[in-house]
Amino acid sequence: MQRITIDPITRLEGHGKIEIFLDEQGNVANSYFQIPELRGFERFCVGRQVEEIPILTNRICGVCPEAHHMAGAKAVDAVYHVDPPRTAKMLRELLYSAFYVTDHTTHFYALAGPDFIMGPDAPVAERNILGVIHKVGLEIGGKVIQARKYGHTVVEMIGGRKVHPCTSIPGGLTKGITEEQRQQIEEMGRWAIDFALFSLKLFDEIVLKNSTYLDLILGDIYTHRTYYIGLVDENNKVNFYDGKVSVVDPEGNRIGKYAPNEYTEWIAEHVEPWTYLKFPYLKKVGWKGFVDGKDSGVYIATPLSRLNASDGMATPRAQEEYEKFYQTLGGKPVHQRLATHWARLIELLYAAERWVELATDPEITSDNFRTIPTEKPTEGVGIVEAPRGTLTHHYWTDERGIATRVNLIVGTTNNYAAIQMSTNKAARNLIKGGNVNEALLNMVEMAFRAYDPCFGCATHTLPGKMPLEVIIRDANGEPIRELKQNL
Amino acid sequence: MTSNGKPKFAMYWAASCGGCEIAVLNIDEKILDVDANFDVVFWPVAMDAKYKDVEAMEDGSILLTLFNGAIRNEENEHIAKLLRKKSQILVAFGSCATEGCMPALANLTPIEEVVETYYSTISTDNPQNIHPQPVYKAPEGEITIPKLYPIVRTLDQVVDVDYYMPGCPPESHQIAAVIDLVIDVLQGKAVLPPKGSTIGAGGSTVCDDCPRKRDVKRIREFKRIQDVMLDPEICILEQGVICSGPATRNGCGALCPKAGSPCIGCYGPAEGVLDYGARLLTSVASVIDSNDPEEIERIIDGIPDPAGMFYRFNLGGSLLRASKAAWAK
């Protein structure tokens, strides 16, 4: 049997590896997307003072520590049965909205954008952020840096540090913000709205008005009919910080909503012996293997799934874009994975609008940012939407507030089964009769880039751009051809 | 020196979170100075280079390598040894590489227990109690994943290290200062510090950078941060909440205490401190206002997790390094 190894490990670390096996006819027999890392936060957070866990779990991922800090903060609120004051919740969500702007901007411009702006068949050397800047102008590079900078500035003002925020504790925050800070935050937020609108316009001009790209988005190769989940508010509008998790089936019917403390009724994780990472699935539907459809419990949790699982966006301009999204793509739900990039920009706009909404709330500068817990700590679950998927933190403590058990289901992990399926599908579509063409590399890469996989959360890789090395071996295991990308 | 005449620069991550890379990217336009003065030959997050290219380089041909992340598995160790061989100056960059950081708290437990916990959580459906193995015989052929080591090690427990740059992550202004220094050295305007030095940090403690007032006040009770409204002007430790400032090297600018949170010790042991936890314990003990053994015991009971509190970032680099049970493997 022939074997193809798509091995990012050659980029010097076990970030993920795809093994593709061919049958006697040279068609794909099976493939394995392996995750070779396990650090074990679920174990070493046990025994710690529970209020420390939102700080410890920051170190799961330096790309999105804000998400872990927020999920952790909500979990410790729940452990202590304390409801933080409105100002504290708003400040946390404000920090989180600014973070989303930074994160989605980075993904679109530096990681995913090049495929569209430069074109999926552009030379590798041009399919990067520099290529994008070259094509659309130096000014955009400056805007991207500015968006990152503004986001990090707000994170530091509220969270105390640019990387690994430290201010969320059970019952609220250790500090508030001043009126002077508020004004700066508002000003940066208004800039962020303009930047988001500009980004959507760019997407419209470069991608949507190009029928080749639109066909690529709407084509079958990147389509999977799965379930979708996402956090929604009481009006079933997308929310990143709070609410219930909405679950819709492949036909777009909402089959239910669960509160954080009900997650074990909905989500279970499957284990395979060939990879360290687990495969979450919908417990009510069941694990049927790496297949899509209504009978398979495979779901995704991404910007696309959040739009599919909701009834709309809670801010006006993002709502307009939401409506346009479904009108253009033929109604809900959208199963085409490449549409995730568009969905991400709609979320970017929502995050910027929400940033300004929160920054202009009269109570945002209130000193009432803490509630001291009075009840004995027990157990609690916190859920937020990380940019790469629904993030669940679950802590149990003894009566002194020492963690006795910890469970974490992190963003990218939700999508692991779907990522495995998407790369498998791309490989099956491209490898026939033992022939591999150069397009495989980018087509396979595009298949999982749509998920913005951050194995920093699952392991520790930065999101997006995955190096690939495809080694085609003959039946004796001897390499007969090598293809490389991003190596 | 390479064909373009510039010295070679590399940055690598082992078992880490990616925060060190983000901190380097946050130096913003300073990145251009790196580009102008160095030939960046290997930096997985920022550019495309290949493992085999590094192997093919002459030994010692990379002038400067910043290595972040701890040594958790066999692959981490392999790359650490390779980069040591290829680099003239190897810097242990960030808390994981210098002292193990939080992932080294796993050293309190045998690795089998760490693995067992992950594959038996409340949401895990694992009736056959599967634990993934380094080698798996799939129906189509054998596939592998790296083997996990019994304990997490720091970089200098695996290879010889030239300099240490602490922080979780190192602050961007400190990174920028180190880059300036190296550029000055290259231009003959400065000399490198002695081998083994800590760079990109101060020579005293976080307390020296902290604006909070200290009155050498003593306490009769330790409190948890959620149970007290801290006065923003007064020393956090003197308000009864454990703050790692007295044992921790300065360099961050006392960010956490300025934001109303105690120092958590991410910059590691202050200059001359042999064991971080022992030093912090001494500092904490010195604020206890009692000579009565029973009362002291009661006060100390207010620190329910001394291992996590005193070795939060530093267990891997401490004199203890790991629990007996983890070592036994």
Image (cartoon, rainbow, N blue to C red):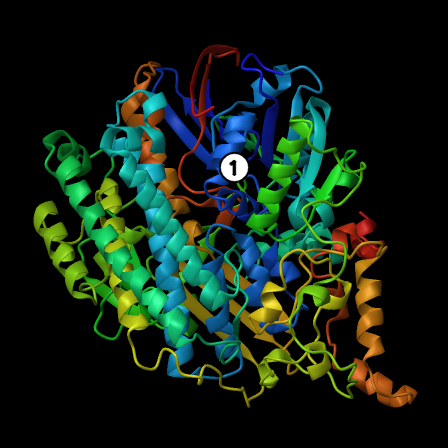
Q: Tell me if residue B150 comes above or below residue B181 in the rendering.
A: below
Q: Is residue B305 visible?
A: yes
Q: Position of residue B310 (x, y in %)?
A: 75, 65
Q: Chain of mark 1?
A: A
Q: Is residue A282 visible?
A: no
**Residue reaching furthest front?**
B189
* Residue A375 in the figure: left or right of residue A212: right
The residue lying at 21 percent from left, 73 percent from top is: A235
Q: Position of residue A425 (x, y in %)?
A: 31, 32
Amino acid type, residue under disc 1 in the picture: His
The residue lying at 49 percent from left, 78 percent from top is: A77
Q: Position of residue A197 (x, y in %)?
A: 19, 52
Q: Position of residue A265 (x, y in %)?
A: 40, 68
Q: Which residue is mark 1?
A: A15
Q: Residues within 10 Å of mark 1 (few under 14, many from 20)?
A: many
Quarter of the figure with residue B160: top right
Q: Tell me if residue A486 comes above or below residue B258 in the rendering.
A: above
* Residue A260 in the figure: left or right of residue B82: left
Residue nearer the viewer, A172 or A75: A172
Residue nearer the viewer, A21 or B46: B46
SS under mark 1: loop
Q: Tell me if residue A301 comes above or below residue A216 in the rendering.
A: below
The residue lying at 82 percent from left, 50 percent from top is: B327
Residue nearer the viewer, B258 or A115: B258
